[in-house]
Amino acid sequence: MRHMNRGGRQSIVLSARTRGQIMKRIVLVLTILLAITSFGCSGSTPEDLFDTAKLEELQDNHEHARELYQQIIEKYPESEYAKQSKERLTKMKLN
C-alpha cells in the first residue's frame, strides 16, 4: 500500500504480517549462509552431520534430515550422535 508522508513523498507501508514474512525469509537465508560457512558440505564428523540434519529439519526439509540422521547411524553407530539421531528419527515419525 502506498502512503504520502508529510514531505509529500510516497512511501510503501507494509502490514505486520508482510513484515513478519520478510523477516522470516531474511533469517532463513542468513541461517543457510551461516550453516554453509560454519559446517561446509563435507560432513566430516558426526557432529557436523547432526547439526546439518537439525538445520534441514528446521527448514522443513524432513527427507534430507532423515537421510543425514540415517547416515550418522550407519557411519558412527557407537557415537552419541547416532543415539540422538535415532531419537530424532523416532520423533519425526510421530509428527
Image: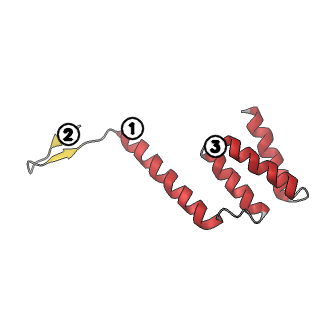
Element type at mark 3: loop
Mark 3 vs mark 2, CA separation in Å: 36 Å
The quarter holding residue 50 reads bottom right
Residue position for label 1: 17
Query: Tag 3: residue type?
Result: Asn
Q: Nearer the viewer, residue 40 or 38?
A: 40
Residue position for label 2: 2
Query: Tag 1: residue type?
Result: Arg
Q: Residue at x 45, y 52 (%)?
A: 26
Mark 3 or mark 1: which comes first in sequence? 1
Query: Tag 2: residue type?
Result: Arg
Q: Nearer the viewer, residue 26 or 37?
A: 37
Q: Looking at the rendered structure, which numbered label has been put on residue 88?
A: none
Mark 3 vs mark 1, CA separation in Å: 24 Å
Mark 1 or mark 2: which comes first in sequence? 2
Q: State left or right for residue 6 relative to residue 14.
A: left
Residue 35, compared with residue 19, is above or below; it is below
Q: Is there a contact, CB below 8 Å, between mark 3 and mark 2?
A: no
> How many numbered callouts?
3
Residue position for label 3: 61
Q: Nearer the viewer, residue 89 or 64?
A: 64
In front of the other: label 1 or label 2?
2
Q: State left or right for residue 89 relative to residue 74.
A: left
Residue 33, compared with residue 92, is above or below; it is below
* Residue 14 point in image, percent of width and height: 30, 41
